[in-house]
Image (cartoon, rainbow, N blue to C red):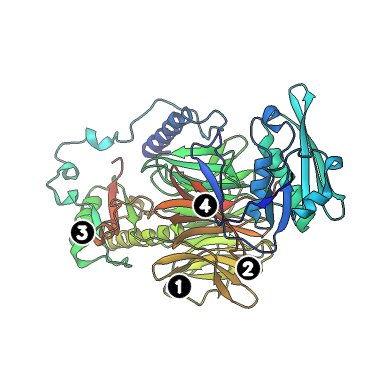
Amino acid sequence: MNWKQLLIGTAAASLLAACSSTKPPETTAPVASQPTTAVAPTTSSEQSQTALDPLHDPNSPLAQRSVYFDFDSSVVKEDYKGLIGTHADYLKANGNHKITIQGNTDARGSREYNLALGQRRAESVKKSMEVLGVADKQLEAVSFGKEKPKATGTSDADYAENRRADIVYDGQ
Amino acid sequence: MLSLKPLLRTIFVVVSLASSLARADMTIEIVGGGSTRHAIAVVPFKDESTRLRDPLTLVVRNDLNLSGMFRVLDTSNVSDVPHTSAAIQYPLWQGAGAQSVAVGTVSDAGNGQVTVSFSLMDVSQKKQLTAGQFTVGPDQGRQVGHKIADMIYRAITGQPGIFSTRIVYVLKQGNANYQLQVADIDGGRAQTVLRSKEPIMSPAWSPDGRYLAYVSFETHKPVVWVQDLATGQRRAAANFKGSNSAPAWSPDGRQLAVVLTTSGNSEIYLVDAAGGGAPRRLTRSDAIDTEPSWSADGAKIVFVSDRAGGPQIYSMAATGGDATRLTWQGSYNVSPRLSPDGNTLTFIQRQAGAFRVMMQDRASGDVRVLSSDPYNERPSFAPNGQMVLYASVQGGQSVLYAATLDGGNKARLAVLNGEVQDPAWGPFTH
């Protein structure tokens, strides 16, 4: 188990532990492991790194982390080739970094089918990065489907906002 | 003076079933009605309100109502109600249209226990159809009520009742409060078995009702977990690189069909329910393959694939191999489940922006709409195959419906205090 998994595991355990205290008394606690010292999930090894890391510069092109898609499409548009290339270059130069690409959908309907559609978008971004030479071990494509919409309205703009894949660096 | 009037004369009958365990207030509505229902009088059990913590007669009546097979007569105007079969004045009940009468008592059994006795009498033949006696704690009124309803259902229809089975669903309250809840089929005795700030979806019952598999995003990606309902112990059953989702138990309880993305695409695999072993891949299309669900005999898996463009429903051997397309109408068919006898397929079809619960007769291929409201999700069959449970959005509020197969009777289990998602009807437990 690396440090990242440990952080997540600890955060999850403390989350569940915190929740169990508010449950009705009849409820069986689902806690998988005993709570340990709470570690905020935002704690990151990057913060100890040099301030010159462009990953933390809000004016760096690396600050752009979202790829938007057309309706019913998982094709990466020309507009986002530059963004993906910038991240690919950074990842190739910083082999210790990993990213998760989180796919999202705007659609209604089956939660599982939407999860698969969001996965297809995330995989599309992942493949674009692999073509540019990023190592597979630095990339993970996952999906939130329609479960974590950024925009909760029902306008076209809201839907467009949710047709998205986000690039998330480890520990962020 | 004996005067009975049908409870179901009006379209909507609302009976509050507030549970002390449920945070949400649930109600049952019976929508519509059938003409061939068995007319039954369930007389209030003697001393139930003083000896039991929860209602009993009300539970029995609600169960019979929601099954769509019964017309429960109102006994509120009956004076001098009978509590034993010997006290029943049959001509009066016959005159009021009752085909059968259930009577019962709750008595002190000592040691803090109570004894619930009941019998069901045929009115025209004046003979006993079934009877039972339960010695339980005073807090077991609901469970006994469901058991009595099961016995009545079996005595009248010849089929096993589903009133003691349970349902699972996800209750979402706000953007960061997800609860996996297990409840009686009338919404009573709701228990939160998992609470998370991240989404929970796709709960699936093990065939013995002991475990739930589900997808949780608590580690910021979809992972399939299996949780023991008795102990609360849980473990990740599929936690591979990428997304892990759509768990479905094999009927023997040994395997889980899941969707993994390790190939770079959503494909269906089998993993051992007990953990360990490498996943066995079942589908090999370039398209999405997801939402697996087993036939009751374990021979087949129905699933959703967009290999032909939009999502359609397919069937394949549970060992993988060639798939047969089952749905040909509509451009979006998802969330398939086969009935226990394999004769009916239920699924969701998108029709002009609406998402409807569909019923397909497997022999003829004929398809009809079951749901009434425009937005519905995730239908599942009751274990006796006589009803379908699904989530629905009605007037901006999300609710659960338990509908008879012909749609003539829909019981609404309304959660007033949140969004109800991804329901699944649990198995018989003996």
> Same chain for the residues at labels 2 and 1, yes or no?
yes
In this rendering, the count of numbered labels is 4
Mark pair 3, 1: CA separation: 31 Å
B395 is higher (above) or lower (below) than B349: above
Few, some or many C-alpha atoms within 10 Å of disc 3 (few <14, some 14-19, many ≥20)? some
- Whether tag 3 and tag 2 are in contact, CB under 8 A, the answer is no
Mark pair 4, 2: CA separation: 21 Å
Secondary element at tag 4: strand
Residue, x 87% and y 51% (percent of image)?
B126
In the image shown, does A165 or B280 lie closer to the viewer? A165
Disc 4 residue type (three-letter): Leu
Report if residue A107 is visible in the image. Answer: yes
Residue designated by label 1: B307
Give the quadrant of residue A25.
top right
State left or right for residue A155 relative to residue B354.
Answer: left
Disc 3 residue type (three-letter): Gly
Q: Chain of mark 1?
A: B
Few, some or many C-alpha atoms within 10 Å of disc 1 (few <14, some 14-19, many ≥20)? few
Residue designated by label 2: B344
Mark closest to the chain's N terminus, 4 or 2: 2
Mark pair 4, 3: CA separation: 47 Å
Q: Quadrant of the C terminus of chain B?
A: top right
- Numbered disc in front, either 4 or 1: 4
> Same chain for the residues at labels 4 and 3, yes or no?
no
Residue B400's mark? 4
x, y percent for residue B428: 69, 50
